[in-house]
Amino acid sequence: MLFGFISFCAGAQDITEGLLFNYQLSGNANDLGMFSMNGELNNVEFGDGPGNLNSEAAYFNGENSVITIPQNEAIEIQYPFSISFWIKRTAFSPGIFTLDDWPNHHSGIWFSTNSNNEIAVNHGNGGGPNGSSRRTYITDKVLELDTWHHIVAIVNDYDNWEVWVDCHITGGYFSGNSGSLINWNQDLGPSFGRKDALNNAPWHYFEGALDEIMMWNRPLSYPEIATICNPDYGHSLSVFYADMDEDGFGDFGSTIFGLVAPEGYVDNNTDCDDSNGLVYPNAPGTNDGIDNDCNNLIEGDEISLCFADFNSNGSIDVDDLLVLISNLNCTEECIWGADLNLDGVITPTDIILFLGIYGQVCE
């Protein structure tokens, strides 16, 4: 499910933000987006979806199969927007789906394929059947038959369109000069599995399968695309943790969900200081007076060689030991550094730690 991939780390995008609709098409046409625009099934069957695990997709027969969606002004948007879906074509059919089913007009947003089996993204200004009433981006990616493909279209403005197919950005070219205004007539509402035709011709019905059709009122980020384009992303999600210091151990407070760990993330949350690559569970001590191994104590080779040089004479000697003893059981206003293990009180444990570095010369 889409909602499993939610990022909580600072500055990262929550993929549900701006999600206008979300049709998972798992046995029904229910909308999991913010407006619950549940669709009506007409001669649609369900079968195997993309991915290696058990999932379902909607199958269309190319003759009269369609999912009709209620009209809703909430999706009548302008730039920017993103649309994502899975598609498996089993025969050539120019129409895939439209968000504004208005026969004999170019309106709303729709997806199609050309005679070369290249996928195209379109929007219209409400005009008739000519190039001045639509704006089309035709990709250079051929969609093979009987093969699942993942599509992401990101339309930022009139000249800035991106289409990703199977996790890779495509090339392509523009056709039509409708202008930047997208006209929404909503004569019949959105239709999945067919595209209204021009010149009073019959509808173009789609033959194949569709799955996980989603739309956002914003551009998707590249990490979001990389996650949702994987066929198993919705079925075996894991939580990953930011590893800012690249020591192989993650920060409990900075998480992201996905199928695989994005760059800079790991599958554990056991780092106690993700800003220092020398601090992680079982790390060797660095004699810097810090808790290298994340056990909430400063001990052994973690103790700074000069940390216990209370009289600053350059060595750990008997005078320093006497200072430490004089502060035994101290909890407030103790001599700086006498609480060697940083447990809040000077105890015999600190004396034992001190004896472990007794005689050392500060460098």
Image (spheres, rainbow, N blue to C red):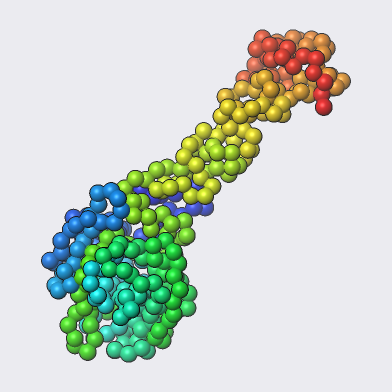
Residue 273's spot in the image, x, y percent? 59, 35
Q: Which x, y percent locates residue 2?
A: 34, 53
**Residue pictured at 44% horizontal, 76% vertical:** 172
Horizontally, residue 173 falls left or right of residue 302, namely left
Q: Is residue 80 left or right of residue 70?
A: right
Residue at (30% x, 50% y) in the render: 52
Q: Is residue 12 above or below residue 123?
A: above
Q: Position of residue 136 (x, y in %)?
A: 38, 80
Task: Judge whether residue 11 can be spotted in this image.
Answer: yes
Residue at x-position 24% and y-position 76%: 93
Give x and y (percent) for residue 28.
Answer: 19, 57
Whether residue 110 sits left or right of residue 340 in the image: it is left
The C terminus lies in quadrant: top right
Which residue does the image show at 85% across and 22% down from the upper left?
314
Q: Picture quarter containing residue 35?
A: bottom left
Q: Is residue 287 above or below residue 236?
A: above
Asked whether residue 1 appears in the rendered view, the answer is no
Q: Is residue 315 above or below residue 213?
A: above
Q: Is residue 201 left or right of residue 313?
A: left
Location of residue 174 by image quarter: bottom left
| Most foreground residue, 80 or 276 | 276
Of residues 38 and 55, the one nearer the viewer is 55
For the image, the number of numbered tags is 0
Q: Residue furthest right?
A: 313
